[in-house]
Amino acid sequence: MKSTAFATRVCQKKKIAATLHLSPKTVRKYLQDPNPERISVQRASKLDPFQEEIERLLNLDPTASSSVILQRIAPQGFDGGLTIVKDYLHRIRGHLKKKEAFIRFESLPGEQCQVDWGHFGSLTYGETKRKLYCLVILECHSRLLYLEFTHSQRQETLHRCLLHAFSFFQRMFQSILMIVLV
């Protein structure tokens, strides 16, 4: 009886190993201890001798890029690559990044559009300069854009552009969200 149970367990281990493409020894090891203690070894980094210099450079310019940092420490004997510098900066700057809050919302077709004005400098007509604006209308569901360039942001110009946009989208919207930056 014992030999039959043993043979069944051995066959199961071999079947598991074959199915998972693992060595039978690996399967046996994980069946004996499913959560083995991981041994982590802390090794010295190529950047260790340069951490003070990197800190000094970041105090001078907190937004310094990894390539700039690499250019500054390479003449001092650093022989590592850009990736190790990027990873190090990401690790030390990770807590400094401000998380920007935003609310994502979905809308149904024809439910909402967003409207905003952009300024594009000015155009010269003979001796006259006229400001150039662009009205941007975004259909929120499909993210389809409508653009119209004008020389005015007056109310009647806005209404005319909205009528053109409704014709372009072939629909009216339940709500129009005006984006106003103060």
Image: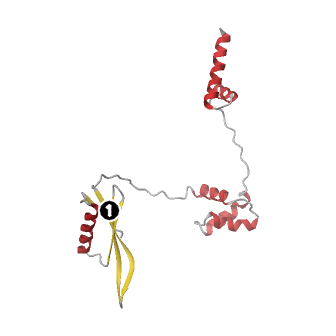
As drawn, the residue found furthest toward the top would be: 1
What is the number of callouts on the image?
A: 1
Q: The disc labelled 1 sits on which kind of residue? A: Gln
Q: Residue at x 24, y 67 (%)?
A: 163
Provide residue 27's location: percent of width, then percent of height. Answer: 65, 28
Residue at which label 1 appears = 114
Horizontal side of residue 104 vs 48, given as left or right: left
At a point 69% along the width and 68% down the height, the residue shown is 72
Label 1 environment density (alpha carbons within 10 Å; few <14, some 14–19, many ≥20): some
Residue 91: percent from the left, percent from the top? 61, 55
The quarter of the displayed image where residue 36 is located: top right
Check the picture and name the quadrant holding the N terminus.
Answer: top right
Q: Nearer the viewer, residue 137 or 36?
A: 137
Q: Is residue 160 above or below residue 122?
A: above
Could you tell me residue 139's position as x and y percent? 32, 59
* 15, 49: nearer the viewer: 15
Q: Is residue 141 above or below residue 76?
A: above
Q: Position of residue 173 (x, y in %)?
A: 25, 59
- Residue at 69%, 62% (x, y): give it: 52
